[in-house]
Amino acid sequence: MFIHNKRLQYTVRVAEPDPVLASYMLEQFGGPDGELAAAMRYFTQGLGDEDPGRKDLLLDIATEELSHLEVIGSIVAMLNKGVKARISEGAMEEAELYMSLNRGGNSHTQAILYGGGPSLTNSAGVPWTAAYIDSRGDPTCDLRSNIAAESRAKIVYERLINVTDDPGVKDALGFLMTREIAHQKSFEKALYAIEDNFPPGKLPGVERYANVYVNTSQGEGDMDGPWNSGEQWERVDDVTSELPVDGGDGLATVGLGDEDGATLAALASRTKSHAGGDPATGVELGAGPGAGKVTGADHGGAEDIDDARTMAQSLTPSR
Amino acid sequence: MFIHNKRLQYTVRVAEPDPVLASYMLEQFGGPDGELAAAMRYFTQGLGDEDPGRKDLLLDIATEELSHLEVIGSIVAMLNKGVKARISEGAMEEAELYMSLNRGGNSHTQAILYGGGPSLTNSAGVPWTAAYIDSRGDPTCDLRSNIAAESRAKIVYERLINVTDDPGVKDALGFLMTREIAHQKSFEKALYAIEDNFPPGKLPGVERYANVYVNTSQGEGDMDGPWNSGEQWERVDDVTSELPVDGGDGLATVGLGDEDGATLAALASRTKSHAGGDPATGVELGAGPGAGKVTGADHGGAEDIDDARTMAQSLTPSR
Amino acid sequence: MFIHNKRLQYTVRVAEPDPVLASYMLEQFGGPDGELAAAMRYFTQGLGDEDPGRKDLLLDIATEELSHLEVIGSIVAMLNKGVKARISEGAMEEAELYMSLNRGGNSHTQAILYGGGPSLTNSAGVPWTAAYIDSRGDPTCDLRSNIAAESRAKIVYERLINVTDDPGVKDALGFLMTREIAHQKSFEKALYAIEDNFPPGKLPGVERYANVYVNTSQGEGDMDGPWNSGEQWERVDDVTSELPVDGGDGLATVGLGDEDGATLAALASRTKSHAGGDPATGVELGAGPGAGKVTGADHGGAEDIDDARTMAQSLTPSR
Amino acid sequence: MFIHNKRLQYTVRVAEPDPVLASYMLEQFGGPDGELAAAMRYFTQGLGDEDPGRKDLLLDIATEELSHLEVIGSIVAMLNKGVKARISEGAMEEAELYMSLNRGGNSHTQAILYGGGPSLTNSAGVPWTAAYIDSRGDPTCDLRSNIAAESRAKIVYERLINVTDDPGVKDALGFLMTREIAHQKSFEKALYAIEDNFPPGKLPGVERYANVYVNTSQGEGDMDGPWNSGEQWERVDDVTSELPVDGGDGLATVGLGDEDGATLAALASRTKSHAGGDPATGVELGAGPGAGKVTGADHGGAEDIDDARTMAQSLTPSR
Amino acid sequence: MFIHNKRLQYTVRVAEPDPVLASYMLEQFGGPDGELAAAMRYFTQGLGDEDPGRKDLLLDIATEELSHLEVIGSIVAMLNKGVKARISEGAMEEAELYMSLNRGGNSHTQAILYGGGPSLTNSAGVPWTAAYIDSRGDPTCDLRSNIAAESRAKIVYERLINVTDDPGVKDALGFLMTREIAHQKSFEKALYAIEDNFPPGKLPGVERYANVYVNTSQGEGDMDGPWNSGEQWERVDDVTSELPVDGGDGLATVGLGDEDGATLAALASRTKSHAGGDPATGVELGAGPGAGKVTGADHGGAEDIDDARTMAQSLTPSR
Amino acid sequence: MFIHNKRLQYTVRVAEPDPVLASYMLEQFGGPDGELAAAMRYFTQGLGDEDPGRKDLLLDIATEELSHLEVIGSIVAMLNKGVKARISEGAMEEAELYMSLNRGGNSHTQAILYGGGPSLTNSAGVPWTAAYIDSRGDPTCDLRSNIAAESRAKIVYERLINVTDDPGVKDALGFLMTREIAHQKSFEKALYAIEDNFPPGKLPGVERYANVYVNTSQGEGDMDGPWNSGEQWERVDDVTSELPVDGGDGLATVGLGDEDGATLAALASRTKSHAGGDPATGVELGAGPGAGKVTGADHGGAEDIDDARTMAQSLTPSR
C-alpha cells in the first residue's frame, strides 16, 4: 500500500513564474522519459517479478519515482501560478492575456486547456501513453530497459538544467538527475546479479547466424569497429550474392488447400493488372489545358519553382 | 539511398494458412519491439550521429531490420492467404465465413479492415506509433536503448517460436531471433567503444545523492542485494524523518509579483472550500427512497453482492 | 513524498489462474476508468489546487487509488501466473501453448508481448493514455469530473463482479467498488463546500440563451421532461425559422485586408468548380466493359447481393 | 436522420484573420472538451438508451452540439482565411511567409499540414481521439459524465473569451458558453428524474468500507472537511497498522496446479537474483578513466553543475 | 532484401541551421503525408499483392520513399546541427540557450526530448502512427488511396517550398515534390491497368440507391453541379417526407428471446426517467447565494461578459 | 445548423442479438473508414472551401454520412441489446455471463467497458482518432482523398455483408455500401469540374525528374507495365551508378558558424567511438558460465531450438 507524506522529497523554490519553462519541464512529468513513465515501468515489473530481491528493488524505485513526479509537478505548478490566476480571474485586458499566453513552448495549451495545472503531456502537449512502457515480463530484458530509461532520463534532466538559470529550479533538477544516475547503478547491479543474463530468455541462438555482421549499408563511409570486425565477427560484404542466407530460393510460399487455392486464383484473375497498352487515366483527364504545368522548363530546380512563384505573385495586386 | 532485392534475406516456407498465428506474428511487424520499431530507431539515430563508425553501424543494422520487416511481413501475408481470398471473393456461406474470422487473436480485424494484408499493428490491433521510438540524440543513451530493444525483441521472438509447430515458420523466426542477439552484441561493442560512457552526457551528478539508496518500500520482504547494500551504497531506511533530503522545508514555493499575488488571492477566495458544516449534496438528492442500497448488510464481502444478485435475478421471469 | 508498505490494502486470494479473466480485469488497471486514471486525475489536481482542504482530500484519494492500482494489478499478476511460467519456460508442446493463449479476451497479447505481467492497457490491449485525464484546473469542474469518474469506475467494477465466481477475486473487487462509492461521496461534499459552484468559473451566461431548450431532434418520439419543460425552460420547436438565434444573417464572415482579399480571390478562381457540363471522370474510365456491375438488377436489396455472391461463388470450383 | 440548414445557429463575424487565435479556438473544435466530443458523447448514449425521454434529450443536445461544431469551425476557418490564401498561392516572399507562420500557438502546423482548414485537433495539434468519450451505457454514470463535460466546456469557453477582444468572436463564444450552462442544467434534471440514482448501477457497496475515509496523505497540512469528518465518516489515520483492511495477510496468492507450480519454480530458479557479492557491471566498465565524473565535488547542488558548465564552456572558443 | 548506399538520392546542401524550419520539415518525415507513411503504405500493400506487376511497382516506390525519408531526415538533421551541439555541450549561458530553443514551431521539443535528431513526429510534435496507413488489401482501393496520398504529399512539399529561401533546401524539396507527381502518375496507370476497377470489389450496388443524390444540406447556397444534376442523377430535395428510403418504419428493432426481453424490461424499469415533476438537482444546490450569476442582465452578448470582466478585474488591486 | 428527424434513413431490422457481429460492425462506426471518419472528412473540408458548389456538395454528403453513422450505430445497438441487459442486471450466473462475453471479436470490451452501447472504436477496440482524417485544404487533393475513402468504405461494407446472414442487417449494409458508390461518383464529378486538377496545387514539377521511373527493387520479378514503360517514362535500372541524381556528392552538409562549429567538434570528440581494440562489454560480463547458451550447436535452425525446448521441458516434473 502507498502512503503519502506532505513534505516533498526535495524542496522546490521557484524564483518567479515562467509558463514557457513550465512547458519544457513537462517532458519529465508527462513525457516519455518522465517520472510517470519511470514509476509505472518499475511498478508493473515489480508486481509480476518472482524474485523477492528484485521485487523489493523495483517497488523501492517505483515509489521514489512517484515522489519525483511530485517534485517535478510542483515545479510546473509553481512556474504556472501566474498564468493560472490570470486566466481564471480574467484579470488582464484580453489582448494582454492573449500576449501572455503566446510566449512560446506549448504554454498556450497549458493555460487554455489545463488551466495552468501540471498536465500529463510532454513539452509538445502530447498526452502520456503507456506505449512508452516497455515492461516485458523477463527480468534480463526489463532490467536492460530500465538501465536505458534511466540513462535517457538523466540526459533530459541535463538538458533542462542547461536552459534555466533559476537557482532553485536548477538545484531540484540536479537532485532529480543525480537520482537517475543512482538508479541506473542499482539496475546494473541487479542485472549482473542474474548469473546467466545473456542472451535474454532461454532459447539459444542459431550458431551460424549469431556472429555474422551484415554490411548492408555500403559505399564511402564504410568503417571498421569492434562491432563488426575482429575475431568474433564474420563480416559479410557481398550481401546480395549470398541471398538468401539459408540457401533456399528467397521466396515466400504457403501451402494452400484446393479450395483456397482456387479462390485465390479467382481473386488474382479478377484484379489482374494488364501490363500492356497505355490506359488513359484520371490525371490525363485532369491535367487540363495547362498540361504544361506538370513540369516547368528544365533549367535547374529551385529556379523553376521561383518562376512559378513569380507568376503566382503577379496575381496579388499590391506587390 | 535504399535499394531492394526481390529475394528475402531468409526463405519463408509456411505450411498452411493460420490467421490466428498471423495475428500473433504482428507483434514483430507492427508491435513495439517489432522490426519497424527497430529499423526506425537505428535509422533516426544514424542520420543524426556525428561519429562515422557509429553512423555506419546504425545504418547497417537499420537496413537489415527493414529486411527483417520484409521477412516477418511475408510470414504474415502467407498465413493470411486463405482468409484474404475468401473474404475478397465472398467464397463461403456467410455463416461459414463468420466462423472462419472468429477463431481468435485479432484475426477478425485483420480480415475485415486490412483484408488479410500485413497491418502495422501489434497482435491486439493497436496501430504502430513512433512513441515506441526512444532515440534521444545522445549516443550513450541511444546505444543503451538499442541494447534493451534488441533484448526485448529476442524474447518476443522466443515466445513466438514457442507457440508454433510449423517448421518453416520456426526456422525463419529462429533466424530473426538470432540476428537480434548479434545486433545486441554489436551495440554493446559500440557503447564500450566510447571511452567514458557513464553517466550519459556531460554533467556529473551531485555527490551527496549519487550513492544513496532510498528504501521507500518497507515491511516484510525488505531485501539486501548488491543494488542497495555494500560499500558503495548509503542506504536510507528511515525515510520520512529525513524529509526533505535537502534540509529545506519540503514545500513548493514561487515568488509572485504583487499583481499576480493579488489575482491568485482572488482566485483562492472565489474557490474556497468551506470546511465546516455538512452541505447537502447531489448524491443525497439522488440516493432516493432505496437509500439502503448504498451498502448491503455487513456480513462479509462477496456475500452481500451475491444477495444483491439474487435479488436482481428475481427480476428475470424465466429463471 | 510517497512511501510504500509491502502489505496490500486488501488481501488478494485468487483460486486459480485464468488469463482471460485477467485480460478483463485490465479495464481497471490500464483502462479509462481504471485506478491509474483515478490516481493521476486527483494527483494532478492536488498539485495545482489553492485550497488546503481540497488539496489534502485530493492527495489522500490519489494515494489510495495508487494502492488500489496495486491490488488490481496483483489480481492480474496472479491470474496470469500460469501462462507467464509456460511461455517463459517453453513448457508445453507448441500446439498446446498456442491453444492455451487463444482462449479469448485479449489474453494472447498479454502473453506474447507483456509476458503475463500486468500491462497498462485496457481489456482490448489499448495502451493507457493521459487523454483519459480531464483535470482542467478549475475546482468546480474538476470535482464534477471526479464524481463522474468515480461513478464510471463503480459500474465497471460491478460488471467485473458479475463475470467472476472466484470468491477471493469477488471479495477484492467488492472492496474496490465500495471505495469508489465512498470517494464519490467525498467529492460531492467537496463540491458543495464551494459556495457558489454553478455555473463553473466566473463569467455568467448570456441571459437570453440560458433557459432555452432547442428541440433539434424531431418527429415521433418527442418527449417532455423536466429537462425541457416547465417554468424554467423556454422550448423552441420551430428551430429553422428562428435561424440564426442572434437575428443576424447566419453567415460566417471575416474582414480581409486588400492583399489577402486579392490572394483569396486568386485562390478561389484557380480552384473554381465548373458547375455546367458533365465532365468525364476516372470512374467512367474504370467502370470498364462490365459497367453493369455498378448496380445489380433492382428487385430488393439483399437479394441483389446474394445474386452477386452466387455468381461469385461459381468461381470457386469445389462448391 | 440528420438534415442541415445552411444558416449557422449563431452568426459569425470575425473582425480580421488571426491564425494564432484560430489555433487556440481549436480546443473547442477538436479538443477533449470541444463540440465533437460533446456531440459524440451524447449521440452514442442516445443510440443505446432504453428510456424514450432521455433518448430524445440526448439526440436533441447531440444535434445542437453538431451545430456548435459548425459555429466554432466557422470561426476557425475565418481566422485562417489569410494564411490559407497566402500559403496556397505562394503569395509572399518565402521569408515573409515563414515569419507569418511563426507567430505562435500551433498555427504553423495548421498552415503547413491542414492548409488553414479547421482541423480536428486541440490547440497543441493533438488529433481528436474517441478516448475522450466516456459513455458507459449506464444512465446514472453517463449523465454525471455529461454534467462534468458541460462544466469543463463552459470553463474552456470562458478562457477563450478572456483572450480575445474581437467583439464578433466574443459574442459567438458567449453564446456557445451559455448553451453549455443550459445543457448542464438539462442533464442535471435528467439525472434526478431517475429515482434512485446513487450509487450507480445495481450492486450495493460493502457496508464496512462505504463510510471510511482513509487519511493516506499525512503530515502538516492535514485538514478536516465535510468530505472526511462528521457523523457519516469513519476516518482512519493510523493507516499502516490496520493493513490490510480485511484482516488477512495482505499478500497476493494464487492456487497453481502441480505442473504450473513446477514450471514457475523453474522460471524463478532460472532468473534468480544472487543477493550476495558485488558483481561487476556495465557501468563500471563504462565509467572509464574519468570516473570522477559520476559526481562532482560536494558543495551544494547547482554549484557543481555550474562548475561542469564552466568546464564545458571552455570548449567553445569564442566565449 | 534492402541494401543501402551511403550516397543520398539527392544532395542536401543546407545554408545554415534553423531549428524552426527543421520542425516544419518534420511534416514530411514523421507527418501523416510524410515519407515514412508513403514507404509503409506501399510496402504493406506490396507484400500482400497477388499481381506480380503491381507488386514490383509497389516495392519500387516503397524503396524510393525510404530514400526520400533519408533525404528529408538529412535536411532536418542539418538544420538542427547547431541546437544539437549547444544543448549537448551546454555551450551557452542558460538564458541564451532558453531563448534559442524558444524561437517557434515545435523546435523546443525537438531540442529537449530528441536532442536535435530527426524525430518521427509531425511539425506539432505528434508521434507518427500507423493510423495514417490506409492499406486495405484490395488493389482498386489501395491504388486510389495511393493516388490521394501522393497528391497530398505534393501539396505539403509545395507549402514547405513556399516558406524557405535556402536554395539548397528548396532544390531538394523541389526534387522530392516532383517525385510525388511521378509516383501519382504511376499509380494512376496501375489503377487503369485493372480492367474493371469501379466500383471496387465484387459486389454491385443496389440499383435504386446508386444514382440518387440526397440534398441534405438546404437553404440559400444550394447549388447545381455535375455531382448532383444531369441525366445520371436522381436528386431528392424533399428529404424528410421520403423517410426512410426503404419504405419501412424507420425504426431500429431486434428480436429478443424471452429471457433477454425480460431482463431488458427490468433494466428499463430500473433506470426509468420520471418525466413529470421538477426534481431538485445538484446545480440548484450549488448555485448558491449568487444565483444571479448563471446569467447576466440581458443587453447583448459580449457586453455582459465585459461587465463580468470589469467586476472581476476590480479584484486585482493594481489596476 | 443541423436538425435531426427521429426516423432513420434506412430501417434497421435485426433478427437477433449477436455481440460478436456487433464488434465487427464497429469498423464502420468508429473505424478508419467508418461513417464518423467520412462525415468529419467532408465537414471539415466544407467549412473551409471557397467554392460554393463544392461547399454545398461537401455539406450534403457530410450530413448524409452522419445519418449513416446513426444507421450503423443502431445496428450495433440492436446486436448488443442482450448483452447490455445481462451485464447491467447481473441476470445470469457469473460463469455463464463470463462465457457469453467470451465468444470472440472484441465483444468482451464492448460489454465490460462500454456496457453494450455503440463505442467509437474499430473492431479491435482501438478508439477513433482524427489521424484518420486527411483533409488538407486543397480541393484537388481533398477530392482525391474522398474518392479513395469512399472506395475503402465500399470494400469494408462488402466484407461485412459477406459475413452475416441476417437479412435485415444485410439489407441495411447493402444500402450503406451503395451510397458509398454514389458518393464516389459525385466526388469524381467534382474533381473533374476543376479544370486543371493535376498536379495538385500551383507549383509545377521539375521537368527532369517528372517522368523518371526508378527501378529500386531489383531481381527476378522485375516487370514492365504502363506505370514504368512506354513513351512517357524514362526508366532508370542502374540506380546506384547514377547516385545522386542531381550530380552532386550525395552528402548532407550545413554551413555552421564558428561557434557552433567548435561546439559540434567538442561534442564529436566527447562522444567519439574508438574503432580499434575490442572493449569488454556488458554482455560479456553477463553471458556467465553457460556462455554456450548464446548459440546452440549448428545443425539447422528449428532443430536447435527444439533441443533447447526439450532441455527446458525436462524442468517440469509431470511431463
Image (tube, coloured by chain):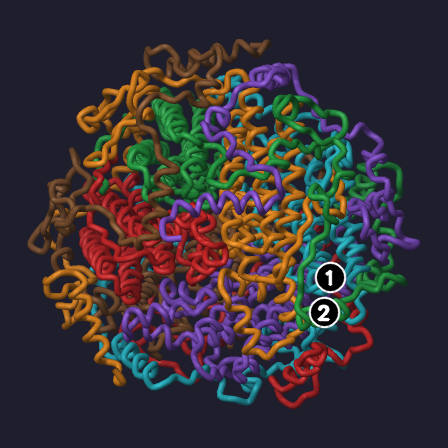
Chain colours: A purple, B cyan, C brown, D red, E orange, F green
Q: Nearer the viewer, residue E47 or F193?
A: F193
Q: Quadrant of residue B170?
A: top right
What residue is shown with label 1? B50
Q: Which residue is more in the foreground, F124 or C255?
A: C255
Residue at the (22%, 31%) spot, across then down: F7
Tag 2: residue type? Leu
Residue A186 visible? The answer is: no
Q: Chain of mark 1?
A: B
Residue E142's place in the image compared with E312, above or below, is above
Residue A96 numbered mark, or none:
none
Q: Is residue C50 above or below residue F103?
A: below
Q: Give the residue displayed 52% in from the left and 82% down from the top.
A: A166
Q: Disc 2 is attached to a residue of which chain?
A: F
**Do callouts 1 and 2 mark residues in contact (Cβ within 8 Å)?**
yes
Pick out the residue farthest to the left.
C231
Residue type at the position of mark 1: Glu
- Same-subunit check for callouts 1 and 2: no
Instruction: Tell me residue D231's x, y (percent).
Output: 27, 74
Where does label 2 land, which residue?
F267
State the quadrant of the C terminus of chain C.
top right
Res. B196 visible in picture: yes
Instruction: Give how far across and how far down residue F131 sits, in percent.
Output: 46, 45
x and y percentages locating residue A3 in the rendered image: 49, 74
